[in-house]
Image (cartoon, helix red, strand yellow):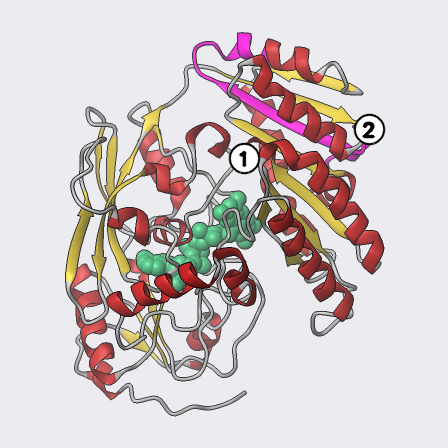
Amino acid sequence: MTSVVADIGWLAGSGVPWSTEPGVLDSRRTDRSGWAPDGRPAAVVFPRTPADVQRVLELADHARTPVVPRGAGTALTGASTAGAGVVVLDLSRLNRIIAINPGDGTAVTEPGVITADLDRAAGEHGLRYAPDPASVEISTIGGNIATNAGGLRCAKYGVTRDSVLGLDVVLAGGRLISTGRATLKGVAGYDLTGLFVGSEGTLGVVVGATLRLRPLPLLTATVAASFASLADAADAAVALTAARVQPAVAELLDAATLAAIDAAQGTSLRAAGPALLIVQADGAGAAEEASLIAGVLGRTATTLRTTTSPDEATVLLAARRQALPSIERLGRPLIEDIAVPRSRLAEAIREIETIARRHGVPICTMAHAGDGNLHPIIVPDRSATEIPAPVRDAAADLFDLALRLGGTLTGEHGVGTLKRAWLGRELGPVQHDLQRQLKTLFDPHEILNPGKAL
Ligand SMILES: Cc1cc2nc3c(=O)[nH]c(=O)nc-3n(C[C@H](O)[C@H](O)[C@H](O)COP(=O)(O)OP(=O)(O)OC[C@H]3O[C@@H](n4cnc5c(N)ncnc54)[C@H](O)[C@@H]3O)c2cc1C
């Protein structure tokens, strides 16, 4: 491991708790991508207030010390990794839900709040925080905002950006700004809130958020349908739009993913068929919508089950949320995250199958069918110590496929370090350059999460 001696003398005078204990440093070096940078971070700082964050960013900017903001470290892209010479800004102690305002349908929180905790707190007022990444129990609001996380319910409620009304952000150098507003509408000035959402900690550090809450649905109905192939299941999901229904959830899982879940969780999902589509409708008309959904899916499904039992639905969605940890038990997977126009979902799935065959690599595929977001997960042999060439080549083909079909390199996980090489191709030189200029405007000394996202 490289050892770079960083100037962190300024930390001693900051008044903010920090640690250089090797175990603490090592636990913040990588994220769930498993990608490890060169060396070990110089220190981990634990701010307790926005003022602590201001102090750290002021001193770090002065000393030109790189700072990596960190929520829970569940990023799948290397976005929250921290190598030699870096100070990690661990935001987990900024974890208060400051207010739930039922009348306004809003919540005000600190960034270190675990997302599911906010949703549960909103539930006590008959409300919900809608964005629910599969990592909802282990990731933070700040991390979700910085990656613009998507989730299962995004088919109806949109991604994190659609629930962020305003942000408190500490800029490089330590100034604190408040963007957006506490109202549900408002268009004064440029949309800096939207700019910070998804900026992967490269433009500023989120220390507070005003978030939109939605009514907790009166009723939820779930349809689980098996199909002879994943492409058939995708076609059926797309056909739902013609039936004028708006599913809240539409999740696709292929045979390899179902087998991995069964092996890890003791379920028997694969036995029903090689592809599973889970569709959920919510709201007062959920039962009626579910019956319309069942009518459409029933045209091509091999088995079909509808339930309004919350327990049964919870079991099905919990299985979906465990898909990634279940696949991780098979080896160290390369988790991809492309999105294509929804109408091209089945085409993308067929091409992914061809890519797997061409490179001789196993690919487990799941998808948020409602928004055309696919997760082809390449699982190299367990013995591989680094990413084997066929896996790298298959990943390159997946990115190429996404762009060719008019899609994107990342639907929700972000660019991090692992997709930077491809970003220029998606953005084009003019926009890529404009985005670099924005980075320089907000962070002239490049101290915020350098080497990530752009
Ligand atoms: C099992 C599993 C399932 C997952 N499912 C999904 C899914 O369904 N949808 C999805 O979108 N993602 C998913 N992810 C990926 C990951 O959980 C999300 O990217 C999540 O938003 C990261 O949150 P975090 O708190 O762990 O952030 P971290 O990993 O700590 O950080 C992520 C990025 O945000 C920045 N950051 C963190 N906090 C702040 C802050 N306060 N201010 C500024 N920048 C900050 C970091 O610098 C980094 O760039 C999954 C991951 C796992 C392990």
The location of residue 232, given as percent across then percent down, is 76, 28
Q: Tell me the kind of residue under disc 2.
A: Ala
Magenta residues span 267-291
Q: Earlier in the sequence, mark 1 or mark 2?
A: 2
Q: On the image, which quarter does residue 242 sit in?
A: top right
Indicate the secondary structure of the residue bearing disc 1: helix
- Do callouts 1 and 2 mark residues in contact (Cβ within 8 Å)? no
The location of residue 271, given as percent across then percent down, is 82, 31
Identify whether 18 is placed above or below 342: below
- Placement of the C terminus among the 4 image quadrants: bottom left
- Placement of the N terminus among the 4 image quadrants: bottom right
Which residue was labeled with disc 1?
Answer: 371
Q: On the image, which quarter does residue 439 sit in?
A: bottom left
The location of residue 362, given as percent across then percent down, is 79, 54
Identify whether 120 is placed above or below 224: below
The residue closer to the viewer here, 176 or 270, is 176
Mark 1 vs mark 2, foreground winner is 1
Does residue 91 show up magenta in the picture?
no
Identify whether 394 is placed above or below 386: above
Disc marking residue 77: none
The residue shown at (18%, 33%) is 183
Indicate the secondary structure of the residue bearing disc 2: loop
The residue shown at (80%, 34%) is 274
The residue closer to the viewer here, 296 or 263, is 296
Q: CA distance from mark 1 to mark 2?
A: 22 Å
Which residue was labeled with disc 2?
Answer: 228
- Badge 2 density bin: few <14, some 14–19, many ≥20, Cα 10 Å: some
Give the side of residue 272 with respect to residue 42, left or right. Answer: right
